[in-house]
Amino acid sequence: MNTEHQELIYDWNKGGIVDMKGVVKIEFDDETLRDGLQSPSVTDPSIDQKIRILHLIEELGIQSANIGLPGAGPRAYNDTLELAKEIARCKMKIYPNCAARTVIADIDPVIDISQKAGIPIEVASFVGSSPIRQYVEGWTVDKVRELTENAVSYVVAHGLPSMYVTEDTTRAHPDDIDKLYTAAIECGATRVVIADTVGHTTRTGATNIVRFVKDVIENTGEDVKIDWHGHNDRGFALAATIAAIRAGVDRVHGCALGIGERCGNASMDLLLVNLKMWGIINNDLSKLNEYCRLVSESCRVPIPFNYPVIGPDAFRTATGVHAAAVIKALKTNEMWLSDMVYSAVPANMVGRKQKIEIGPLSGESNVMYWLHDHGYDMNGDMTKKIFDYAKHSNRLLTDDEIEAFIETEIPEHERKHYESQLAAA
């Protein structure tokens, strides 16, 4: 949007107690190829598809990616190795990490892959931390601390960066979080992850726990980064992640289309869009649509028609008054105006465009736009006939249906007249 036109949108999102102006930098860790694939409904993509997804992750300006849990089995190991080799071979900027339980059997495959690919891989060693997990597993907090110390020390001794993850952090007791994070940091962890493993937390909860963890780290005197990993079981993943950013985390995790275990993870695509809209990041998101559609296709996860920004209906309208406003904006030849007059997000920013269709709620302006967009002369009779046809329908008309109607209902001499005019033009 041109600066001289900024006054055309008054932004109530700025100012007040929830302003993002204090956030100066945030990084992203893409979990699509690991946590995203733990959804019970997805198909594990081929390695070629995973490599294409990895390159799109980098092209979107996402700094790091979890490339697998190689301790899960031969397929997981082989795919993780190939992704690591691709990063090395192409000299990609993406910084890889791998998930591992706090056991040597999970950590060794990551060390092995790192050595074979010739690149450092951050080891995200995770262990359950909440009282309910400890009760079910038969653990004490001292046992969890022992697992923590052994795993982090082993990673550091093998020269790899340690990212320590407490599962179910958002339901863990503060004293336990303090003991576990302090132990991990003392053993050499350079990053800790607050995991909202079952999507329990609200914005308030996210703010509270991030502030608490910042105090724990400050008390150690070490320079340790904080990540946020959120799930969507209560529908709070995006809001809680944004609250965590405001509270001061260094990096947030997400998956394309919000895929992941049960109800999924925070949506990486929506995080990127919103943070760009706030002006916090300046990533080129022109390939965001391609990234989401590739994940949808390769994981066999349909994109809901009303999914924000990427869904089929996000920039599609057939309502007469909406279409009329978009058409008027298009006539100004200012793309941003047509993108924003009935949209919160510019379609062009994410590699899409506005689409005006014809249905029972359409006006004649919809029909005229469709005719012009498909190379027809906007003759009054043709417009009125299609308009009347649409008014008797109970849904949107497809392009094929409109073409067939023109073919059968518009007299041949009229169609030839329009076609000759179009050829002459």
Image: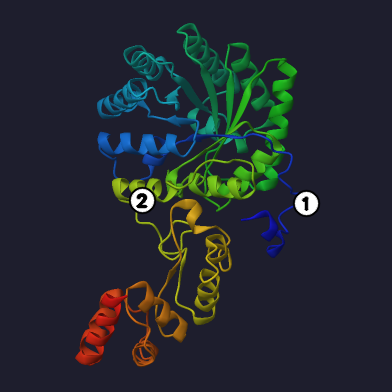
394 vs 86: above or below:
below
Q: Which quadrant of the rendered structure holds the C terminus? A: bottom left
180 vs 423: above or below:
above
Kindly indicate the quadrant of the structure image that contains residue 65.
Answer: top left
View extreme (front): residue: 424
Percent position of residue 368, x then y: 41, 81
Percent position of residue 382, x then y: 34, 89
View extreme (right): residue: 16
Name the amino acid type tagged 2. Arg
Q: Residues within 10 Å of mark 1 (few under 14, many from 20)?
A: few
Residue at mark 2: 293
Q: Is residue 40 left or right of residue 199?
A: left
Which residue occupies 26% across, 34% down? 47
Q: Is residue 299 shown to the viewer in this render? A: yes
How far apart marks 1 and 2 lie (CA) works out to: 35 Å
Percent position of residue 148, x then y: 54, 18
Which residue occupies the foreground of this view, 130 or 112?
112
Q: Residues within 10 Å of mark 2 (few under 14, many from 20)?
A: many
Which residue occupies 40% across, 49% down? 292
Percent position of residue 235, x then y: 55, 53
Q: Is residue 72 left or right of residue 124?
A: left
197 vs 237: above or below:
above
Name the amino acid type tagged 1. Gly
Q: Is residue 361 shown to the viewer in this render? A: no
Colouring rule applied to residues = rainbow
Label 2 SS: helix
Which residue occupies the foreground of this view, 93 or 415?
415
Q: Is residue 157 left or right of residue 387?
A: right
Kindly indicate the quadrant of the structure image that contains residue 158.
Answer: top left
Say the numbered circle drawn on residue 15.
1
